[in-house]
Image (cartoon, rainbow, N blue to C red):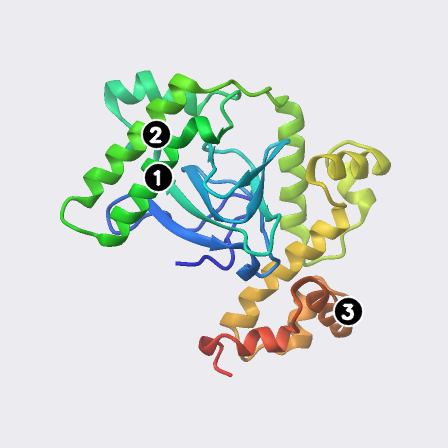
Amino acid sequence: MQIYDIDINENKMETTSHKTDDFPVAIYETILKKNILGFVDWHWHSEIQFCYVTAGRVRFCVNSFSAVVEKDGGIFINSGALHMAEPMTDDAAYICIDASSEIIGCGAIGKKYVLPYINDPSFSFEIFDEDGRAVIDRLKRAHDVSAERSFGYEIEVASLLSMCWKDMLQNRTPAEVCENETYERLKSILTYIHDHYSEKISLSGLAEEIHLCPSECCRYFKKRMNRTIFEYITDYRITQSTNALINEPEMSISRIAYEYGFGSTSYYIEKFKSKTGTTPLAYRKSFPKAGL
């Protein structure tokens, strides 16, 4: 199943359900060019996440780190880590496995082998290349088993993910720790934007919120996020506006433009098309459930 967009709350935490029936594991494909902006924007979630690239090359950014992962390579992203993914090739795609840490182990096992690492700031991510071949093979097997849904598939998936976890702990290289203050400051900027995206956001107001001067705020954000604050705001507004385009067919394009923070309808259409390659109306019409 392709995820076209990721729902996130006011703290940039992903709210997409990662639970299938009563089994807290979700496995899905992401073809990046099919996402509304062509990439998966910054977010975080409480689940741990394993990804392996099925086509092309993908740049994964985790907190202040980034790495390009090629086909048949993969990455682990720990619970609570802020992350995003963008394509490096037109065909970039990957399989994502999100799971509750309880799948790996609870009770005595969880206390010894899970919780200390979930809360370890030097364990925000792990890259799987040739040395991680066994992990990638298990992730592929987990995907196939989940798709088949044969009797007892949950047991096998849980076992495979547990073995992936064990391999990581044995072979991992601790990452450089991002300073807590820096990480929290970035989350504060994103939270402010999310809370006020429908309003006119001034750089001075945003900078004051995080106790930085405007120039330092811009420099800091671009260094960490690889784009300007106002580019991010525009991207976020466009992403949020798709909810109304798809789910509220009676709402006019003009009303959506103003309610999602754009100064005019023409500006909204211009930015939407420049970012997505299509107009808001054409995007709306591509979804039958929009009623058009």
* x then y, percent, for residue 186: 66, 35
Q: CA distance from mark 2 to mark 1?
A: 8 Å
Could you say where residue 58 lies in the image, as x and y percent from the top left? 56, 45
Mark number, residue 274: none
Type of amino acid at the residue the image marks with label 1? Leu
* Residue depicted at 64% across the width and 21% down the height: 179
Placement of 141 over or under 265, stated as above or below: above
Q: Which residue bears the numbered disc 1?
A: 139
Q: Residue 116, can we see it? A: no
Earlier in the chain: of badge 2 and badge 1, it is 1
**Number of other residues with Cα within 10 Å of mark 2, as a class: few under 14, some 14 to 19, many 20 or more:** many
The secondary structure type at the circle numbered 2 is helix
Dot 1: what SS?
Answer: helix
Do the residues bearing badges 2 and 1 touch, measured as CB atoms within 8 Å? yes
Q: Are marks 1 and 3 in contact (CB under 8 Å)?
A: no
* Of 184 and 56, the residue lying toward us: 56
Q: Are marks 2 and 3 in contact (CB under 8 Å)?
A: no
Q: Label 2 sits on what residue type?
A: Cys
Relative placement, left or right, of 220 versus 40 is right
| Front residue (pair 66, 285) | 66
Rendered residue at 60%/48% (across/down): 86
Name the residue furthest bottom.
Answer: 292
- What residue is shown at x 38% (from left), y 17% (from top)? 170
The residue at which mark 3 appears reads as 267
> Disc 3 residue type?
Tyr
Q: Position of residue 1 (x, y in %)?
A: 39, 58
The residue that mark 2 highlights is 164
Sequence-wise, which precedes: disc 1 or disc 3? 1
Quote the CA–CA distance across marks 1 and 3. 44 Å
